[in-house]
Amino acid sequence: MKSTGLRSMRGQVTVSGGGGGTGIGAGKLQLLVEDGLINTGYRIVAFDVWLAENPPTQTARTVFNAVLTMSSVPGTITMDASDNRQIAWAFLENPIVAAAPGVDSGTGPIYRTYVDPDHVAVRDLFLQMAASDGTYNYLIIIEKMALTDDEAIVNIIKEVSQSVP
């Protein structure tokens, strides 16, 4: 694999449907679409997601799990590092809970991202979220890779959650 430069992907995804008991909705966005060019792949370098509100208003219920997947995962997305289709994860947990009326517990929001550097997206890439309803920004830094036919085949197998080292 040979790097041919860095690129960025950025935009917004809307999450809705969280009116039920959990308050968590779902959002999905296809970022790469299979174009038949298997000798070009993209390695994820960085992945960030944040609320689009200005200024951001976080409540005790503002939470999200965001996952970059190489094939669409049906239903509500869960972060599962054992699933080879999932290659990057971001989450926000907001444990701000009042100890007493008007008293902050002192615990602020927790935000974290993880990126698996050993996967290269060749065909498809999706951003899937389970989150509080709203609009979220994303920024993904990708490294464009030139692949041999053999490297492309190995990475395509990884995309469909096969066990290939």
Image: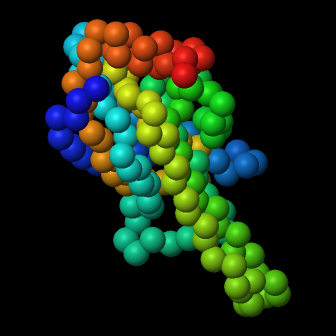
Residue appearing at x 48%, y 45% in the figure: 115
Q: Is residue 101 above or below residue 75?
A: below
Q: Kindly tell me whether residue 16 is visible in this rendering.
A: no
Asked where in the image residue 61 lies, by quadrant, the reply is bottom right
Q: What quarter of the picture does the N terminus occupy?
A: top left
In this picture, residue 135 sits left or right of residue 41: right
Asked where in the image residue 145 lies, by quadrant, the reply is top left
Q: Where is residue 162 in the image (x, y as percent from the top left)?
A: 57, 14
Q: Position of residue 122 (x, y in %)?
A: 34, 21
In this picture, residue 31 sits left or right of residue 37: right
In this picture, residue 137 sits left or right of residue 147: right
Q: 49 or 153: nearer the eye?
A: 153
Residue appearing at x 69%, y 75% in the figure: 96
In this picture, residue 54 sits left or right of residue 28: left
Q: In this view, does 115 lie above or below 99?
A: above
Residue appearing at x 26%, y 14% in the figure: 148
Q: In this view, does 147 lie above or below 9?
A: above
Q: 150 or 26: nearer the eye?
A: 150
Q: Where is residue 66 in the image (x, y as percent from the top left)?
A: 52, 45
Residue appearing at x 18%, y 40% in the figure: 5
Q: What quarter of the picture does the C terminus occupy?
A: top right
Q: Residue furthest right?
A: 100
Marks counted in the figure total 0
Q: 64 or 143: nearer the eye?
A: 143
Q: How is the image coloured?
A: rainbow
Q: Position of residue 111 (x, y in %)?
A: 56, 63
Q: Residue furthest left?
A: 4
Q: Kindly tell me whether residue 105 is visible in this rendering.
A: yes
